[in-house]
């Protein structure tokens, strides 16, 4: 099976999001062939390069979303009219959509007026894609005065919501520029029979812009689309736009909401990483029949030794592990620990992790000052050196070489976040067989089940009471830790993640009609990109027939100067010669 893996700011870039998950998926499904279609977000991301790619990656095509593009394309009168009509319809769909998410009906389709606007958005989106295909690109047109005036007319038209009517010229220019970057995949030359048209399945590693190539491959070539979201892009947009004006926030939220709804409507299967993401997807119109929750797969091997030796932990030490940032609410944790110290004077708190960006560095300084104020250095005598019961540490040193050592150093792991997606750090603690006390945010309850204690966020007293209860009851700690380890090994390993996606790939292909554009040398249709018999030496694996059937998928098409294709070198051996030729 040939899979087109679609990413934005992720795999195969070294600093990309979800790169580890994608790499494990590709390496775990070595019986399939992967082609990567990656959108980059910054110049630094491209400069840092790619991770080493396994041999089952047949081709990588990349395109930047961060740089300014001038396609030097001059539209004729008819093309300008087509663009104005399509972009005007798109703008109207955004301005008449409410600033929140469209309400979803029982079948996952938006109800009433929202259904009409969803169809208008989809028609405009595919109309722009067809125009880009006919004329060679859209970037210049999307930044043109025509686009700004079309957006302005839509904002001033009767029926536009209030925040859109309040948009001023700077707001319109900002929104136009942001839409141009988001719609840049429409201008790529990826949607032909020898590119995404030749794959059996498109797998978008996230929603949003990353899924756009999959939508177009489905529109132009009928390639089925699978969408995986461990963090919902629409939610991320709401969290990262706090300083923009209300008009900018509402228009961009409407765009991302419409794009999410269209993605969920066209996808064959949607795989949220947890129930928290699933609720967001259902709110945006995803059909429940398409949803399959697939938890992130994590490597349990580094934590095996700690999980098998729970008795090595210090029974009076609490551990917090993660990135230091305001969302982790270490201030509440420190206030909770003050109450814990009053109940258990010998207890100790180890905060393990580095700051996340400038904001995290400032927050770390604040937390250290608060700890020094709440817990003055304590000495055993007048001539002894004082010791603070709260320590701020990072992994990589002689005392804590790894995260596994950090979890192993304490009998109780604490999570105090006010915002959380899937709590990977909590699952690592479960692999180590540690009892946990966590705040009820994100997918925490889904991850721990009944194997840990959960308290409300921003409630230091409740957090302290739960920690004291477990510190005073070692038998209960041991039972919860053992149950947590068993649950993590059953649900959150790399193996279960890979097995789940392999089954979903087969499920999608089993109910997808064969596209009869791929023929062998006898004129018979090939239902899969790499059928099973291609791995068995014989006449059916003749490399000449395969290349002729595909129309030369290994040959790059000449496209815009900002799209790049690379062909990773393949390792060939005499044993796998027939397999390599078939590919």
Image (cartoon, rainbow, N blue to C red):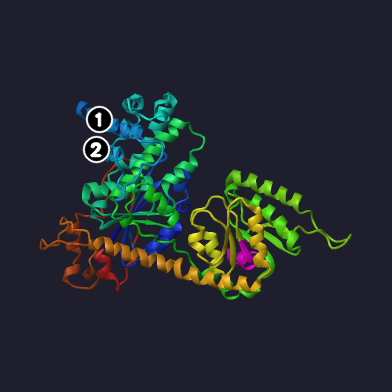
**Secondary structure at numbered mark 1:** helix
| Image: magenta residue range | 396-413
Classify residue 29 by image quadrant.
Answer: bottom left
The picture places residue 561, in percent across and down from the top left corner, at: 33, 40
* 562 lies above or below 296: above
480 lies left or right of 388: left
Question: Is disc 2 surrounded by few (<14), some (14 to 19) or many (20+) residues within 10 Å?
Answer: some
Which residue is painted at 85% across and 61% down in the image? 384
The picture places residue 175, in percent across and down from the top left corner, at: 40, 32
How much space separates mark 2 and mark 1, taking CA atoms? Answer: 9 Å
**Secondary structure at numbered mark 2:** helix
The residue wearing badge 2 is 127
Question: Is disc 1 surrounded by few (<14), some (14 to 19) or many (20+) residues within 10 Å?
Answer: some
Residue 516 in magenta stretch: no
Check whether the beta carbons of the residues at disc 2 and disc 1 lie within 8 A of each other.
Answer: yes
The picture places residue 553, in percent across and down from the top left corner, at: 24, 55
> Residue 30, can we see it?
yes
> Residue 12, can we see it?
no
The residue wearing badge 1 is 85
Q: Earlier in the sequence, mark 2 or mark 1?
A: 1
Classify residue 70 by image quadrant.
Answer: top left
Disc on res. 107: none
502 and 477: which is toward the camera: 477
């Amino acid at each position: 099976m040939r899979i087109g893996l679609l990413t934005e700011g992720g795999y195969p870039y070294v600093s990309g999001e979800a790169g580890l998950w994608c790499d494990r998926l590709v390496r775990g499904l070595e019986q399939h062939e992967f082609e990567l279609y990656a959108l980059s977000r910054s110049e630094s991301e491209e400069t840092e390069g790619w991770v080493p790619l396994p041999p089952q990656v047949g081709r990588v095509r990349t395109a930047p979303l961060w740089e300014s593009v001038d396609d030097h394309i001059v539209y004729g009168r008819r093309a300008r009219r087509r663009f104005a009509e399509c972009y005007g319809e798109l703008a109207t769909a955004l301005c008449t959509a409410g600033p929140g998410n469209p309400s979803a009906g029982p079948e996952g389709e938006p109800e009433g007026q929202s259904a009409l606007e969803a169809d208008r958005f989809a028609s405009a989106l595919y109309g722009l894609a067809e125009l880009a295909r006919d004329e060679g690109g859209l970037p210049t047109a999307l930044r043109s005065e025509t686009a700004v005036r079309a957006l302005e007319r839509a904002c001033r038209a009767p029926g536009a919501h209030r925040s859109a009517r309040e948009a001023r010229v700077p707001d319109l220019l900002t929104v136009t520029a942001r839409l141009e970057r988001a719609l840049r995949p429409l201008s790529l030359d990826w949607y032909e029979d020898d590119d995404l048209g030749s794959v059996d399945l498109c797998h978008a590693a996230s929603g949003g812009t990353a899924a756009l190539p999959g939508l177009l491959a489905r529109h132009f070539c009928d390639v089925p689309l699978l969408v995986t979201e461990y963090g919902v892009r629409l939610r991320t947009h709401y969290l990262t736009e706090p300083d923009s004006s209300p008009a900018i926030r509402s228009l961009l939220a409407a765009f991302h909401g419409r794009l999410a709804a269209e993605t969920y409507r066209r996808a064959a299967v949607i795989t949220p990483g947890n129930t928290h993401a699933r609720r967001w997807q259902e709110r945006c119109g995803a059909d429940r029949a398409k949803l399959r929750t697939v938890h992130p797969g994590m490597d349990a091997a580094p934590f095996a030794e700690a999980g098998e030796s729970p008795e090595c932990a210090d029974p009076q030490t609490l551990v917090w592990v993660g990135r230091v940032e305001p969302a982790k609410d270490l201030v509440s944790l420190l206030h909770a620990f003050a109450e814990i110290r009053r109940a258990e004077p010998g207890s100790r708190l180890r905060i393990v992790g580095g700051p996340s960006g400038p904001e995290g560095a400032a927050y770390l300084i604040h937390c250290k000052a608060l700890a020094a104020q709440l817990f003055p250095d304590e000495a055993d005598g007048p001539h002894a050196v004082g010791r603070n019961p709260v320590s701020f540490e990072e992994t990589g040193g002689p005392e804590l070489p790894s995260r596994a050592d950090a979890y192993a150093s304490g009998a109780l792991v604490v999570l105090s976040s006010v915002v959380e997606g899937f709590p990977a750090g909590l699952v690592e603690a479960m692999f180590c067989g540690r009892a946990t006390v966590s705040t009820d945010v994100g997918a925490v309850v889904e991850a721990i089940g009944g194997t840990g204690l959960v308290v409300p966020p921003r409630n230091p007293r409740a957090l302290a009471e739960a920690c004291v209860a477990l510190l005073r009851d070692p038998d209960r700690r041991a039972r919860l830790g053992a149950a947590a380890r068993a649950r993590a090994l059953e649900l959150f390993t790399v193996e279960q993640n890979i097995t789940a996606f392999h089954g979903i790939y087969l499920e999608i292909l089993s109910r997808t009609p064969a596209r009869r554009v791929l023929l062998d040398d006898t004129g018979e249709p090939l239902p899969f990109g790499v059928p099973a018999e291609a791995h068995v030496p014989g006449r059916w694996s003749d490399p000449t027939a395969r290349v002729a059937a595909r129309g030369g998928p290994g040959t790059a098409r000449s496209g815009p100067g900002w799209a790049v294709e690379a062909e990773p070198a393949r390792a060939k051996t005499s044993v796998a010669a027939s397999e390599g030729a078939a590919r």
